[in-house]
Image (cartoon, rainbow, N blue to C red):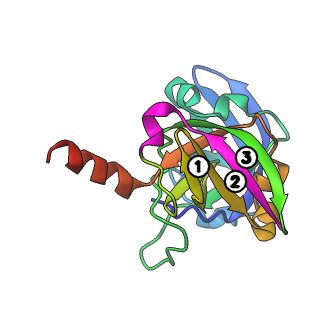
Amino acid sequence: MFTGIVTDLGEIIELEQRGDLRARIKTSYDLSTVDMGASIASDGVCLTVVAKGDDWYDVEISGETVSKTNLGNWAVGRKVNLERALKVGDELGGHIVSGHVDGVAQLIEMHDEGDSTRMVFEAPEELAKFIAPKGSVTLNGTSLTVNEVSGCTFGINVIPHTKEVTIWGQAKVGDRINLEIDTLARYVARLRDFA
């Protein structure tokens, strides 16, 4: 489990297509405190550490994960939002995030509003019903508050701090974004289906 509070900005330093895609991610995490097999959310996708060095770790990404996320767009040099798994007693600063991406949204509009940047996304139709104004979504591993929703589109604001410490400072219209809907919204909808 994660919170959607990005704690490091990693960088893809190697990619290799084997049976699965293998990625090496440079990080400022103290890797002596990261166990082999640990989960690290990488652009919102829960990935398992399979090898590590002083300032990097490797993950293996299945074809299924590549097909359901934007990880197929990864390239050497790309920056990546990182978050280590939640520990009992940690502050829950964002919202409960599983690291299981539901689909890919597209950034369709962005403009400055004061010091913040307003971004509008188009969600897959089957996921749009789970997105509500003032609710939470996870976009590329970042917990964000939804401002408004209209059909399959929704908007969020990104403050300057978030743009500085995450990949959101490099976002551009047309980007494909990993989307995880709020777990609570999913369960409420499931309960409604059986009411």
Measured in 3D between alpha carbons, the distance from the residue under mark 2 to the one under mark 3, in whole angstroms, is 11 Å
Q: Under tag 1, what secondary structure?
A: loop
The residue beneath circle 2 is: 81
The residue located at (79%, 33%) in the rendering is: 75
Q: Which amino acid type is marked by label 2?
A: Asn
Let me know if residue 151 appears in the view.
yes
Q: Under tag 3, what secondary structure?
A: strand
The residue beneath circle 3 is: 25
Q: Is residue 21 left or right of residue 56?
A: left
The residue located at (67%, 66%) in the rendering is: 7
Q: Position of residue 24 (x, y in %)?
A: 72, 41
> Looking at the figure, which quarter contains the N terminus?
bottom left
Q: Which amino acid type is marked by label 3?
A: Ile
The residue located at (46%, 70%) in the rendering is: 87
What label sits on residue 44 in the rendered view?
1
Q: Residues within 10 Å of mark 3 (few under 14, many from 20)?
A: many
Kindly report which numbered mark, 3 or 1, lies closer to the viewer in this rendering: 1
Q: Position of residue 8 (x, y in %)?
A: 72, 62
Q: Start and end of the magenta stretch?
A: 115-129
The earlier-in-sequence mark between 3 and 1 is: 3
Q: Residues within 10 Å of mark 1 (few under 14, many from 20)?
A: many
The earlier-in-sequence mark between 2 and 1 is: 1
Q: Is residue 184 left or right of residue 10?
A: left
Labels 2 and 3 touching (C-beta < 8 A) = no
